[in-house]
Image (cartoon, rainbow, N blue to C red):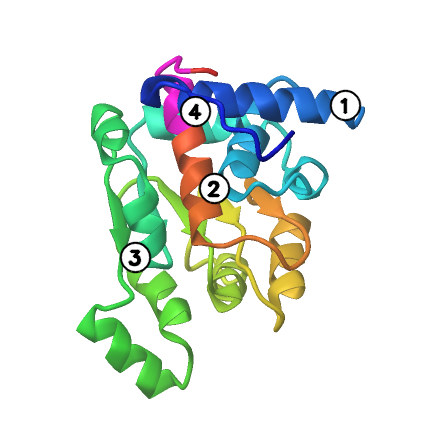
Amino acid sequence: MDNDFIYVKPADIERESFRIIGEELSGKGIVLKKKQEPYIKRCIHTSADFSYATTLAFSRNATSVLEGLLRDHASVICDTHMALSGINKTALERAGCRAYCFMTDERVKEMAGKEGTTRAAAAVSAASHIEGRKIFCIGNAPTALIELNKLYKEGRLTPDFVIGVPVGFVNVVYAKELIIDSDIPYIVNRGRKGGSPIAACLINAALYRIENRQL
């Protein structure tokens, strides 16, 4: 029974969780693509929501592209400090990467007020000045995805990868579909679900993959 207590050593909790997830997916008749499996299972592990097995969308060769960018020391730009804090900093450092969030930057606040937009949208513009390749990790603000798409179409910003998993009810589905319909490499969760923990766990899944830490 689900409410029966099972003693599991702390070091084995994650491994046992992934075993259970695999068992339940098998029971539902769901077979995941091998390269996508660690990402989808980690989203389920983070949320206890099995719908990610069917709603998480990947562009062509998405996982290989994302892992390659991290191997090449790409910067990760988050739309919330929650997503930033959820990324495994030890694994990030070992990959030679840095992660940023500009939401509380005074210049971003001023830009948002002046242009009448959200700070998340203004933060995307601020991130365009970071040198090198860039991964955008969006878990909260659909306006960030909309701004990314706009700047990309205008030739003012070229995102190398977008994790688009904002959660909510207003413009969320629309913003996600903009990324899916673009030619930017992506992992997007279709529908209303998502959130900063999901955005962070997808980055972590890629970091663990390049460290060959597979469960």
Q: Dot 1 corresponds to which residue? A: 27
Closer to the eye: label 2 or 4: 4
Left or right of 33? Residue 63 is left
The amino acid type of the residue labelled 1 equals: Gly
The numbered mark at residue 14 is 4
Q: CA distance from mark 2 to mark 1?
A: 33 Å
Asked if the residue under mark 4 is in contact with the one under mark 2, i.e. CB atoms within 8 Å, the reply is no
Give the SS element for disc 2. Answer: strand
Q: Quadrant of residue 153?
A: bottom right
Q: How many marks?
A: 4
- Work out whether residue 131 or residue 25 is closer to the camera in this orientation and state it: 25
The numbered mark at residue 83 is none
Q: Residues within 10 Å of mark 1 (few under 14, many from 20)?
A: few
Magenta extent: 206-213
Q: Residue at horizontal 66%, vertical 64%?
A: 174
Q: Is 207 covered by the magenta stretch?
A: yes
Closer to the eye: label 2 or 1: 1
Closer to the eye: label 4 or 3: 4
- Work out whether residue 189 or residue 12 is closer to the camera in this orientation and state it: 12
Give the SS element for disc 3. Answer: helix
- Can residue 18 be seen by looking at this rendering? yes
Q: Dot 3 corresponds to which residue? A: 81
The amino acid type of the residue labelled 3 equals: His
Give the SS element for disc 1. Answer: helix
**Which one is earlier in the sequence, the residue at label 1 or at label 4?**
4
Q: From what the image shows, is residue 29 above or below residue 167?
A: above
Q: Is 75 covered by the magenta stretch?
A: no
Q: Position of residue 61 (x, y in %)?
A: 59, 27
